[in-house]
Image (cartoon, rainbow, N blue to C red):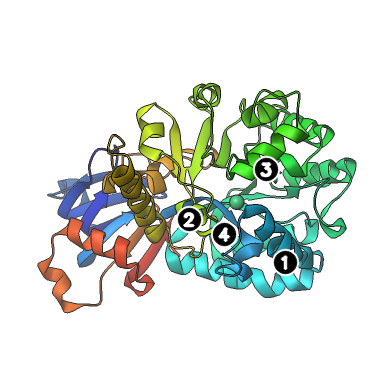
Amino acid sequence: MIKILKGHIIHTPTKERFEVHADSYIVVEDEQVVGIYKILPDQYNDQSIIDYGSSIIIPSFIDAHLHAPQYMQMGVGLDLELMDWLNQYTFMLEGRFADVNYAKKVYPHYVDALYEYGTLRSCIFGTIHDEANRYLVHAMKEKGLSGYVGKVNMDRNAPVSLVQTAERSLKETENFIRDFKDDSMVKPIVTPRFAPSCTDELLDGLGRLSVTYHVPVQSHLAENKAEVAWVKTLFPESASYTDVYVKHQLYGPEKTLMAHSIYLDSVEMELAKSAYIYMVHCPNSNMNLSSGIMPVTQFLDEGITVGLGSDIGAGHTLAMQQTITSAIQCSKIRHVLSPKERILSEPEAFHMATKVNGSFFESFGLIGSFETGYQFDALVIKDPSPIMDTLKPVEQLQRFLYCGWTESIQVRYLNGKNI
Ligand SMILES: [Zn+2]
């Protein structure tokens, strides 16, 4: 089935610039983009056109790192640093998901909020609890959203209510993988919480599951200085934090997301250049917990793949618009303090939240752009203000990114369908 949409079409096939097609047509066949045209080819003359007037049409957002259970906790306890925040707030909250009825209360609000903000695909940490994780998958599918959901694995260094034996944790992970690996909308991802909460036995088993079932991996890396020092004492035989994951096949050979990655040594920087490795910059979270600021343009210029994540609840908003602008603002602060570091450009940051994050979703198709053959995932945005017609399409996008009004999102498309 053919769909033709008209409006100001903006995307970032490359990170260097916004590609703007003012007053143009985008043709979608079934789920995928056929092409963008200023003048519609004759073959489509009989087709009806969905005319969005002066609205802008952009790829929908993808969040590469967030914690669904922490939706309840956004903005709470953010005067603390990472380990105190985990111990005083997060672990207690996550323990409540042992009761699936609690998950049933929280997760519908969480998926509604993802939808409202235009984040139609995401890479999500659940909790250790099988029933609650399965309910989360169900809630995502009910809402028509796509993503990777990970059963969190922990077998030490957390309250009793949040640790399982390595054996049970692996068994539940394997069952979860088997049940969802062929799902077309929500797929499993191997999720050791972070090295300190896992024994070698658990990490080893998780690496084996990732390789056996060809399932990607997500975890945390080098977020906070105290955490990095702690990992050294927990894994004295490992050369670095990264090396802990490398040793257990949790850093490649399957695609891997490593959230934060602020404090990497020169050997770790080299390892990060692998095509399978994505560092996920989470600027709001890193500022809130005083963790640090990733030198993002340095990473990009050295050829490291960097995606973007909201990291709620340490991040205080699900809005990828504001995650994009925070990433830019963080790079400006680094630039002011150290002028040799360049500023992250708007197209670069937008590219991270769409095409780069989207490339992690290769088992769902081509994601995150309007190039031919990509899945048509899109947001149609019209600012309610009457002055918007006087702004150029890119200026409308800038205003949407910085001001972040969700009511500006008129229509959401996923896989070519208006959802
Ligand atoms: Zn996180």
The amino acid pointed to by label 2 is Met
**Which of the two labelled residues, at mark 2 and mark 1, occupies the earlier sequence position?**
1
Residue annotated with mark 4: 314
Please tell me whether mark 1 sits on a helix, a strand or a loop.
Answer: helix
The answer to whether 221 appears left or right of 158 in the picture is left
Which is more foreground, mark 2 or mark 1? Answer: 2
Residue at 13%, 70% in the rendered image = 389
Residue at 75%, 34% in the rendered image = 233
Q: Which numbered disc covers residue 93?
A: 1
Residue annotated with mark 2: 287
Please tell me whether mark 3 sits on a helix, a strand or a loop.
Answer: loop
Please tell me whether mark 2 sits on a helix, a strand or a loop.
Answer: helix
Q: CA distance from mark 3 to mark 1?
A: 28 Å
Instruction: Find residue 22 and report its image quarter.
Output: bottom left
Q: How many marks?
A: 4
Q: Which numbered disc covers residue 181?
A: 3
Label 1 CA crowd tier, 10 Å (few <14, some 14–19, many 20+): some
